[in-house]
Amino acid sequence: MEIAATLGRFTLYRLQILGRSGIFLFAAIFQAFLPPFRLQRLIKEIEFVGSKSFLIVFVTALFTGMVLGIQGYYSLSQFGAEAALGVMVALSIIRELGPVLCALMVTGRAGSAITAEIGIMKITDQFPALEMMAIDPLKYVISPKVLAGIISLPLLTAFFDLVGIAGGYLVGVKLLGVNEGAYLGKMITAITFTDIYGGILKSLCFGVLITWIATFIGFTSEPTTEGVSRATTNAVVLTSLSILIVDYILTSLLL
Amino acid sequence: MIRVKNLVKRYGSLTVSNHLNCHFKKGKITVILGGSGSGKTSLLRQLTGLEKPDSGSVFFNGLDLTRLRRKKLYEARKKMGMLFQGSALFNYLNIFENIAFPLREHTKIADNIIKTIVTMKLEMVGLRGTEDLMPSQLSGGMTKRVGLARAIVMDPEIIFYDEPTSGLDPISTGVIDKLIKDLNQTLNITSVVVSHDIKSCFRIADNIIILFYGDIIAEGTAQEIKNSEDLRVKQFINGEPEGPIPFTRTDRNYLDEILFD
């Protein structure tokens, strides 16, 4: 009996948190569409989540593409199908690696920083200060961050795809001597709109996921130094795991 | 200005506001005194609507803050200013933008006029010339003064101070006390100060409320409190370690706990 009760309490507690975080996300997105609009705040957050992630996404994409080039060439040449290298690189990046790796990199760079920033604002009473100035902290602090994630991630993913394919091209065509026409030509005929659409849809979901978890965990963190450091770690771990799990669910739904 | 009726607030089994009734008069400085954990900060948060009481009402200009919708509450808050214990300045904005923040958010005042207003407020707290610094570059006493400048930038009717002098050196304490007094006298701003600093309290207070573990044990003018015959009040304002106010928190008998646990 005792065990059942504990289990029940635990489950209820978790469900409660999940419910609260859902309301939190809904309110943050809803608030974003009510005036007054804070375009400057949004642009600042997009700069932080999006444009400041460009370099890290660029490097990740380039090396992922290059590795795919080598590995793909090795596997495909066993069947004498090197010509399909372009298709293989492009498909794996656009459908899978682009959205996932991009999201993981942004989690590490921006997600952790968002949680820490919000936690520190909490420690220093900045949320009640906003409240006292008659400004809704959810609308002022959280909404722009969530929107920035939704806007930035698909764009970063598109950039990742481009650089990744170029990386594969660099290694496959320039280094290993795959025919250039085959690499690009086959790719263009083989990739369908559904592939691209699926990848972008995934990145949209990851954008919501990253900022949702980062802001919620920061917002509910314990306002102490240990509390914030724990929250930051939790946010990164939870986001990374969620990305991989949601990726599986989305892939199975989209196929 | 503010009337508190039958306010009750509990955290778990701990009662921090036990059926409180009190009154904060317009144009006066009222100091809420009490030891750590006496429920004074919690009372302050309930007075501003930051925290909802379990039951009871807080009337601000006749409006019950505990029952207001968010929008109305925000409307009422525009008439309030608050100085937080840690100042609560925005660390990503410089001093100028920190003070200008409420103006930029709530008004459409032109930039050059905002500059004039901010300069005036900074002059009031004696910090003109620090506009371009970041909050982290100022000392504790100075950030409090910047926080005060931000609290008065919208010309509030009432200012709440959460332990304005705790952790400050005697001179900074004197400066803050003088500012509180000056703001009250020159602009006729009603002030509510939460404090445990007796010396500074008697320097500024018109009225004093003493809290003890969620109960109001004394309420009156500064003079009345000074002359009070109540042993608990005497103990508190003289800072005596022995007296009717126990030093320990628990009700359990010390001997029982040592011998029979």
Image (cartoon, coloured by chain):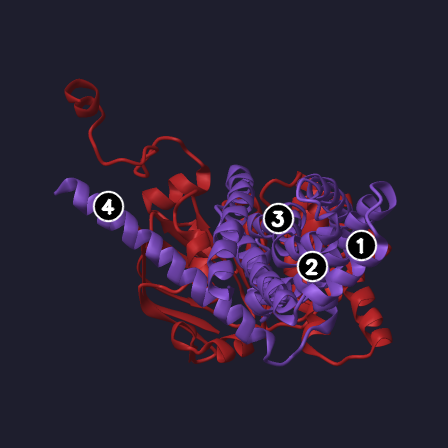
Chain colours: A purple, B red
Query: From the viewer's perspective, is the residue at label 1 or at label 2 nearer?
Result: 2
Position of A116 with respect to B135 (left or right) is: left
Instruction: From the top left corner, tell me how far across and down residue A247 is, in percent.
Output: 52, 55
The reply to whether callout 3 and callout 4 are in contact (CB within 8 Å) is: no
Q: Mark 1: which amino acid?
A: Leu
Which residue is painted at 48% across and 76% down in the image?
Answer: B70
The reply to whether callout 3 and callout 1 are in contact (CB within 8 Å) is: no
The reply to whether callout 1 and callout 4 are in contact (CB within 8 Å) is: no
**Going by the picture, which residue comes out furthest to the front?**
A80
Instruction: From the top left corner, tell me how far across and down residue A230 is, in percent.
Output: 51, 39
Which label sits on residue A104?
3
Which label sits on residue A157?
2
Who comes first in sequence, dot 2 or dot 3? 3
Which label sits on residue B127?
1
Q: Chain of mark 4?
A: A
Which label sits on residue A110?
none
Q: Chain of mark 2?
A: A
Q: Mark 4: which amino acid?
A: Leu
